[in-house]
């Protein structure tokens, strides 16, 4: 007989773990480079709107299913919808595999940079430095190191591993990001950064691609569409107030992304480096968008002199904390499925599944073009598609989602609205986005094979 299901030891523990899942490389690195590429403030606004109208209802749906079923995603979907829905759960678990395998490679670069930042970056050499370390044995080694840490924490359990790590590290992350944003405001010449980041130019929104990217980012950043939030919610007691939790998680996630922009853009503009990253998608200056911040920010830190060593170290420390607490949730999806479905005990599930994910990361560690395509597949197909599947599931297949979500939140009146969003609005938006995203992703895979 399996051990009884673990539960979070406190509400704060759950909230910080879930915020830890949401806040990660997506908020600092991915959010910043997409904003730089797709037109600044207008893109930020679009992302915020999609997070609230599409992301938030899906988040609440994941929390309701997870807490109600008290099972890992595959079984949770079967619990409320019958066995026909199990494949959707399997897609969630596959997404966990895929995302963690390349996410950990980027996290590995971050470990490397955090160590390097202590010694200080050499402004002229940062481009070469990135070229040297982001592919090959170096990248692989640090990817393994990061996976090792992730496996170690997840093997420690929900309470003793994941919750404890989030309780200690998340406050540190908040303090670092806010501190760095305040510091950025003191730099001469930061005004251009604020203007780009905060004054919208709506003509930037005219391309269809922008909507796809903003939706993918909203789902990635909130850890939606692959059962991460569902898995964490499955360790909640029945009395949790889910709408409140979903609001706290969504606003914390948007808040950290927003503040991260307040640190990145002023720094880049103050040091005259804007040209290197702004609007570079598909142009000759396109340094491989994925790497843009890993080259430009260290350059900024180098120009700051002695202060830059300190600031740079703190920045990469924050990035690393975010990456780790997100990686925990990615691995937990896979581990909980193995525990539930195969009857494995936690330690074994963490080591075997984590090891398999580390292997799957090998191509991404050797070739950043592959990493970039994997990121596209994960976001455009898995997360947006998973979100669509989940909205249809909760909107149409699940028997009484409103009763489920009302438990612990009696007296909330707008749940019928939530249900109709899931039934109609969310599927329409995601369906429209997928019409654009699917062929584009297919094209990017084909291009990779053409070489
Ligand atoms: N939300 C995380 C981030 O912003 C990434 C993530 C995606 C984590 C999906 C879990 C599931 O970095």
Image: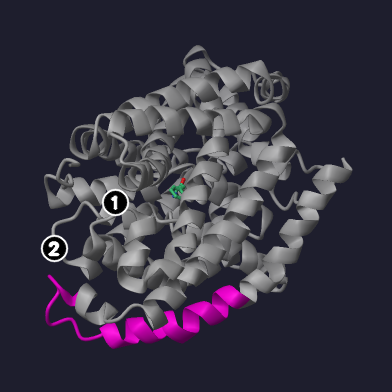
Magenta range is 406-431
Circle 2 sits on which residue? 238
How many C-alpha atoms fall within 10 Å of the one at disc 1: few (<14), some, or many (≥20)?
Answer: many
Can residue 196 be spotted in the picture?
A: no
- Vertical position of residue 345 compared to residue 199: above or below: above
Q: Position of residue 91 (x, y in %)?
A: 51, 56
Vertical position of residue 354 compared to residue 96: above or below: above
**Ligand 1 within 8 Å, label 1 CB:** no
Asked which colour scheme the image uses, the reply is: one colour
x, y percent for residue 154? 32, 33
Instruction: Residue 299: tell me if it is visible.
Output: yes
Identify the residue under disc 1. 232
Q: Indicate the secondary structure of the residue bearing disc 1.
A: helix
Residue 50, how many percent across, how many down? 49, 70
**Residue drawn 29% across the image and 34% down it:** 346
| In this picture, residue 228 sits left or right of residue 135 | left
Q: Secondary structure at mark 2?
A: loop
Residue 113 lies in the magenta-colored region: no
- Give whichever of 365, 169 is nearer the camera: 365
Image quadrant occupied by the N terminus: top left
Q: Which mark is residue 124?
A: none
Residue depicted at 68% across the width and 43% down the height: 372
Q: Main secondary structure of the magenta part?
A: helix
x 70%, y 70%: residue: 436
Quick check: is 415 in the magenta stretch? yes
Q: Which badge, 2 or 1, comes first in the chain's sequence?
A: 1
Q: Residue furthest top?
A: 119
Q: CA distance from mark 2 to mark 1?
A: 13 Å
Q: Residue furthest front?
A: 1
Give the position of the C terminus as an image quadrant. top right
């Amino acid at each position: 007989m399996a051990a009884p299901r673990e539960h979070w030891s406190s509400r704060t523990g759950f909230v910080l773990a879930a915020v830890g899942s949401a806040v990660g490389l997506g908020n600092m690195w991915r959010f910043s480079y997409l904003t730089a590429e797709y037109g600044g403030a207008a893109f930020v606004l679009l992302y915020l709107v999609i997070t609230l109208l599409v992301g938030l209802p899906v988040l609440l749906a994941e929390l309701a299913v997870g807490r109600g079923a008290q099972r890992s995603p595959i079984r949770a979907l079967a619990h409320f919808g019958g066995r026909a829905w199990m494949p959707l759960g399997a897609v969630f678990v596959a997404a966990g595999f895929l995302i963690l395998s390349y996410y950990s490679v980027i996290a590995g670069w971050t470990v490397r940079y955090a160590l390097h930042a202590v010694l200080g970056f050499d402004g002229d050499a940062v481009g070469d430095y990135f070229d040297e370390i982001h592919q090959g044995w170096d990248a692989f080694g640090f990817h393994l190191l990061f996976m090792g840490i992730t496996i170690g924490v997840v093997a420690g359990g929900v309470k003793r591993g994941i919750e404890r790590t989030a309780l200690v590290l998340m406050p540190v992350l908040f303090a670092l990001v806010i501190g760095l944003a305040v510091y950025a405001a003191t730099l001469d010449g930061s005004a251009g950064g604020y203007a780009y980041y905060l004054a919208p130019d709506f003509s930037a929104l005219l391309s269809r691609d922008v909507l796809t990217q903003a939706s993918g980012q909203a789902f990635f950043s909130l850890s939606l569409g692959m059962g991460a939030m569902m898995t964490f919610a499955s360790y909640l007691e029945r009395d949790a107030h889910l709408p409140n939790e979903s609001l706290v998680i969504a606003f914390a996630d948007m808040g950290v992304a927003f503040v991260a922009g307040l640190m990145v853009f002023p720094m880049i503009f103050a040091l005259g480096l804007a040209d290197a990253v702004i609007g570079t998608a598909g142009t000759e200056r396109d340094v491989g968008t994925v790497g843009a911040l890993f080259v430009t920010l260290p350059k900024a830190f180098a120009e700051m002199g002695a202060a830059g060593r300190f600031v740079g170290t703190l920045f990469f420390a924050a990035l690393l904390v975010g990456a780790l607490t997100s990686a925990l949730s990615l691995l937990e999806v896979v581990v909980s499925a193995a525990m539930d479905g195969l009857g494995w005990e936690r330690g074994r599930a963490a080591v075997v599944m984590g090891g398999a994910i580390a292997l799957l990361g090998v191509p991404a560690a050797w070739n950043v073009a592959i990493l970039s395509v994997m990121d596209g597949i994960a976001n455009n197909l898995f997360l947006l598609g998973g979100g669509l599947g989940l909205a249809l599931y909760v909107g149409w297949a699940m028997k009484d989602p409103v009763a489920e979500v009302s438990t612990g939140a009696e007296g909330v009146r707008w749940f019928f609205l939530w249900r109709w969003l899931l039934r109609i609005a969310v599927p329409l938006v995601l369906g429209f986005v997928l019409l654009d995203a699917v062929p584009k992703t297919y094209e990017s895979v084909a291009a990779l094979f053409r070489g």
